Amino acid sequence: MADNKRVVRTDLWINEAFDRRLKDEPGVSLAVFPTRGNAAAAWDLLGAAHVYHVSAAKDELPREWFVSGELLARCPQLLCVSSSGAGYDTVDVAACTAAGVAVVNQAGGNAASVAEHTLAMMLSLSRRMTECDKRMRRETITSREAIMGHELRGQTVGLVGIGHVGTRVAALAKAFGLEVIACDPLLAPDEIQRRGAQPRTLDQLLAEADIVSLHCPRDATTLKMIDARAFARMKKGALFLTTARGGIHDEQALVEALRSGHLAGAGVDVWDREPPPLDHPLLAMENVYATFHTAGVTHECRRDVAAMSADQIALLLQGGRPPRLVNPEVWPAYEQRRARILR
């Protein structure tokens, strides 16, 4: 077994727990490559790496360092790509599988933070808190009833996806007296019930929910899934929330649903382009709670995800099977390559 198992990461910000954990791991070296300004040095490190811990932030990482077929061809010893988050938009998973490279993510590590953020959006929009805050800073409000909102109690929230985050949202929502329904094509109805929601199809959910909240992955099956037709199926006066990924909802269709008055408000944490341009029409709307893809960005979450990432990498380099393997079908080919490369 090789004494020097090489892990590399970018120089983008990461909680110190990642480096600290791997520096304590026997037989593992960690190197940091520059994402800008010295491509030769970066390729020297990447070309010899066994594990590449890649940023999941598609609009922060230069495309040169996305995990593509071209990058894999230049990294013949690469055994594993580790995404820094639950998403893996910067990784071509099919190319990794074809190359015998395992892909891992950190699903679940951000669940508590994202669920809290989702509930904050629900409360703010239902009670018109951000609208009230903005108006108080520019005008004298003479009628409190003019900014009157609604209690969450008694409303129905529909969760599109009930994985790690959705399950936590369901529990928090029930504490506020919400009814919870959910659709998830990956789960049987009894499992959706076990996770705290009543199962529905997507069309049923859109028609029944007072609040629709997205918690599904972004992939070929979900891109633009929430389009003009989907918004039209929602109740008049409903709220739309997303802390999932940009591209799952159609941004222009959301703009039109809000402008027409069909939807009462929206909470948007994820965008087609991040950050969105300052002249984006959603940013001009007082009934939109807009955040900067920060639902999972808390001190606690960043620390926990960094430590989780390093633990999973250490386990893999010790010969174990990582618990959050994105492409499990790669495992036989991965083991053959690992035996050859780390002999």
Image (tube, helix red, strand yellow):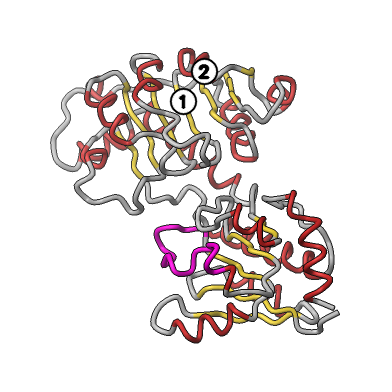
Q: Is residue 224 above or below residue 112?
A: above
Q: Which residues are magenta?
A: 56-71
Residue 86: x and y in percent read 59, 51
Q: Is residue 193 above or below residue 129?
A: above
The main secondary structure of the magenta stretch is loop
Tell me the amino acid under the disc marked 1: Val
Q: Residue at x 27, y 34 (%)?
A: 131
Where is mark 1, residue-wise?
A: 212
Tell me the amino acid under the disc marked 2: Leu
Q: Residue at x 77, y 77 (%)?
A: 25
Q: Nearer the viewer, residue 3 or 268?
A: 3
Say what secondary structure mark 1 lies in: strand
Query: Which is more N-terminal, label 1 or label 2?
Result: 2
Q: Is residue 258 above or below residue 10?
A: above
Q: Residues within 10 Å of mark 2 (few under 14, many from 20)?
A: many
Residue 63 included in the magenta stretch of the image: yes
Check whether the beta carbons of the residues at disc 2 and disc 1 lie within 8 A of each other: yes
Residue found at the far left of this picture = 139
Q: Residue at x 59, y 23 (%)?
A: 182
Distance, label 2 to label 1, CA atoms, is 8 Å
Residue 244: x and y in percent read 49, 41
Residue 156: x and y in percent read 51, 18
Q: Which mark is residue 198?
A: none
In the picture, measured across the screen, residue 32 lies left or right of residue 148, that is right
Q: Residue at x 80, y 80 (%)?
A: 26
Where is mark 2, residue-wise?
A: 205
Residue 130: x and y in percent read 31, 37
Q: Looking at the figure, which quarter contains the N terminus?
A: bottom right
Q: Residues within 10 Å of mark 1 (few under 14, many from 20)?
A: many
